[in-house]
Image (cartoon, rainbow, N blue to C red):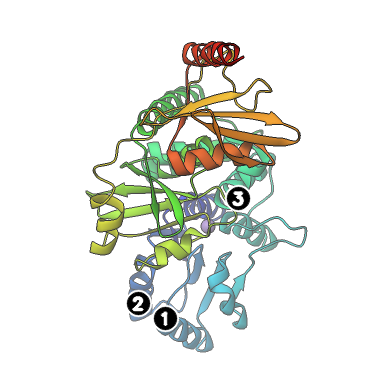
Amino acid sequence: MYRLYTHNDLDGVGCGILARLAFGTDVDIRYNSVQGLDFQIERFLEKDRSDDVLLITDLSVHSENEKRLDEFVKKGGNVTLLDHHKTALHFNEYKWGSVTVEYEDGRLAAATSLFYEYLMEHGWLDRSSSLDEFVELVRLWDTWEWEKHDVLKAKRLNDLFFMISIDEFEERMFNRLKEPDIFSFDDFEEKILDMEETKIERYIRRKRRELVQTFIGNYCVGIVHAESYHSELGNELGKDSPHLDYIAILNVGSKKISFRTIHDHVDVSEIAGQFGGGGHAKASGCSLIEEAYKLFIAEPFPLDSLRVDAFKNQHNLKASKSGSLYVDRDENRYFIYPSSEKWIIEKNQSEEASFSSFEEAERHIKRNHSAWLVRDDLFVRYLSDHILNEKRLK
Ligand SMILES: [Mn+2]
């Protein structure tokens, strides 16, 4: 009997689907959370499973189970651990461990792509074009390379995974991947994915209007309360307001904070680390401990949300040679215009600062004054008042 203990995300379930295709009913597949695997392994070792082939993918065990598994192998047990996480690299010291973070050509590895190659090497599974594509989509999603290459199909595969149960996803993919031709979504899946996309867009637009800006430590932070779609929210809000160093997404119900950034100069795993959490440089999280509650909820609570830049303008446009007009809550006006290789900021018609690019000038007024681009009518009035004043002075 084969046993596959794997992760309960798309990459882990991708391994499960491949195992089902390779071993049919001769495999017992368990999908685990990161914490759940060790419990599963202990139960496995308690029973006499020396005839089984144990495969662990996309997850690794803690150091005690690492020793136990090594002893089990020394006594003749059959174990293989395949992973792609940096934190698991030490398993390469064992004959039964194989951890690859990156392929030789520079592509990042995923558990599903490693497991696919492993199954083919052992002659347990044959290559097909539908499998090639499915595995590649999972890899692109799991390594986040889909964003760089703009492969929306990979994101849609993960969206589908979250919209239906693991069992249903497994069954749908299993039936489709038995056929060797091109991998594609069926009409029903395309339809629900389109609906989901519209729903996410609306959700993000609503959340954008709730975004609050404040300084925490040295960082200019965007704060939003949200239960769902944290990755999409962090990404879209970050791109919409690049003057914010990172986005903090709060969920009071689950007492958790997610941190997301689109910038290379910020490492949000460090921010999460200050509150006992962790993660990656661009995506991290922590529990909502009291200190974090104070900084991210209580103190910013009285603040009004950040206004949205006017987006239907014909005249008051960003980086325009004829200038761009912004206003803040106290009705101060900020006029940014180019003059001899510089971008000048005039606050209420007297020069406040100058920068070498429009982006820097805008960043300055957005970070320091929470100002927003005004609608065309205000811009036109501002310009005509300005010209009249100048004429009168003459
Ligand atoms: Mn993975």
Query: Could you say where residue 14 lies in the image, as x and y percent from the top left?
Result: 52, 50
Query: Could you say where residue 285 lies in the image, as x and y percent from the top left?
Result: 39, 58
Specify few, some or many for label 3: CA neighbours under 10 Å numbering under 14, 14-19, or 20 or more. Answer: many
Element on which disc 2 rests:
helix
Q: Are marks 1 and 2 in contact (CB under 8 Å)?
A: yes
C-alpha separation, residue under disc 3 versus residue under disc 1: 28 Å
What's the mark number on residue 139?
A: 3
Q: Nearer the viewer, mark 3 or mark 1?
A: 3
Q: Is residue 158 visible?
A: no
Specify few, some or many for label 2: CA neighbours under 10 Å numbering under 14, 14-19, or 20 or more. Answer: some
Which residue is denoted by mark 2 in the rendering? 42
Q: Nearer the viewer, mark 1 or mark 2?
A: 1
Query: Could you say where residue 85 lies in the image, as x and y percent from the top left?
Result: 55, 66
Tag 2: amino acid = Glu
Q: Residue at x 48, y 29 (%)?
A: 348
Element on which disc 3 rests:
helix
The residue closer to the viewer here, 262 or 393, is: 393
Question: Image check: 114 left or right of 247?
Answer: right
The residue closer to the viewer here, 279 or 58, is: 279
**Which comes sooner in the sequence, label 3 or label 1?**
1
Which residue is denoted by mark 1 in the rendering? 65
Give residue 301's quadrant in the image: top left
| Above or below: residue 280 compared with residue 178 | below
Q: Residue at x 52, y 54 (%)?
A: 282
Specify few, some or many for label 1: CA neighbours under 10 Å numbering under 14, 14-19, or 20 or more. Answer: some
Query: Could you say where residue 324 lies in the image, as x and y percent from the top left?
Result: 58, 24
Question: So how many labels did they put on this image?
Answer: 3
Q: Residue at x 65, y 23 (%)?
A: 320
Whether the residue under disc 3 has CB within 8 Å of ligand 1: no
Position of the C terminus, as image quadrant, is top right
Tag 3: amino acid = Arg
Tag 1: amino acid = Asn
